[in-house]
Amino acid sequence: MPPPLRLRPTMLSDLDFVVTVEDDAANRPFITPWERTQHEGAVRFPDFRHFIVEAGADGSRSGFVILQGCRNPHRSVELKRIVLQSKGHGLGRACVRLLKAMAFRDLKAHRFWLDVKALNTRALALYASEGFVEEGRLRESVRLAADGADGYDSLIVMSMLDREFQARVALGQEGPP
């Protein structure tokens, strides 16, 4: 069972932590890191929701998440980024469940979507098990040029619609992780 989890709005004073977690060797292969100024913009711009993930009894910072499209007139909200320090303890699943509820209940999304690198098999399995449906692939759309690698990876676009979320709620699949 994952430790207690909560999301709180990211403050500018959290950005050193955010950049450090993003730059961690365990996370870097799976994301395209942002400059600090990009995170500052996401914290300030109303179309984004930038949150610190706090976990455990002490509420220590465990990562961060970013939603984009929160004011999208088409009600299509993107899970832009989820980056956690600790893996394999259920925090990712707990975060995804909180974010789905936020997207559909609070932001009134019609569609909640994301893209994920094909090499991130762990995340792909999590998103599929949480009801996200693969929509397509952007073949070789991101360059891999770290740790001596020089090549490309594909992005897999996945989404969930509000009616799919409501069906999962009705089936009891959207409770606590």
Image (spheres, rainbow, N blue to C red):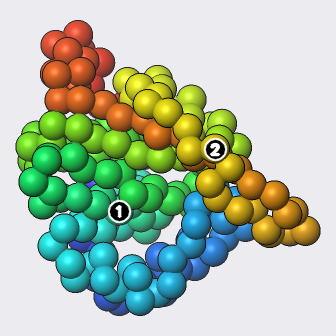
Residue 8: in sight, yes or no? no
Q: Are marks 1 and 2 in contact (CB under 8 Å)?
A: no
Q: Quadrant of residue 47?
A: bottom left
The secondary structure type at the circle numbered 1 is strand
Residue 166: in sight, yes or no? yes
Left or right: residue 11 compared with residue 70:
right
Q: Residue furthest top?
A: 171
Q: Residue at x 40, y 82 (%)?
A: 38
Q: Quadrant of residue 132?
A: top left
| As drawn, 65 above or below 125 | below
Q: Position of residue 87 (x, y in %)?
A: 60, 48
Who is closer to the viewer here, 105 or 16?
105
Q: Residue at x 43, y 36 (%)?
A: 158
- Which residue matches tag 1? 66
Who is closer to the viewer here, 144 or 125?
144
Who is closer to the viewer here, 155 or 7?
155
The secondary structure type at the circle numbered 2 is strand
Foreground label between 1 and 2: 2
- Which residue matches tag 2? 139
Which amino acid, mark 2? Answer: Arg
| As drawn, 167 above or below 177 | above
Q: Position of residue 58 (x, y in %)?
A: 38, 63
Q: Position of residue 45 (x, y in %)?
A: 21, 78
Residue 9's mark?
none
Question: How many neighbours does mark 1 have within 10 angstroms: few (below 14), some (14-19), or many (20 or more)?
Answer: many
Question: How many neighbours does mark 2 have within 10 angstroms: few (below 14), some (14-19), or many (20 or more)?
Answer: few
Q: Position of residue 117 (x, y in %)?
A: 61, 47
Image quarter (top left, top right, bottom left or bottom right) of the C terminus: top left
Work out how far the residue at label 1 is from the one at label 2, CA to CA, in angstroms.
24 Å
| As drawn, 161 above or below 87 | above
Which amino acid, mark 1? Answer: Ile
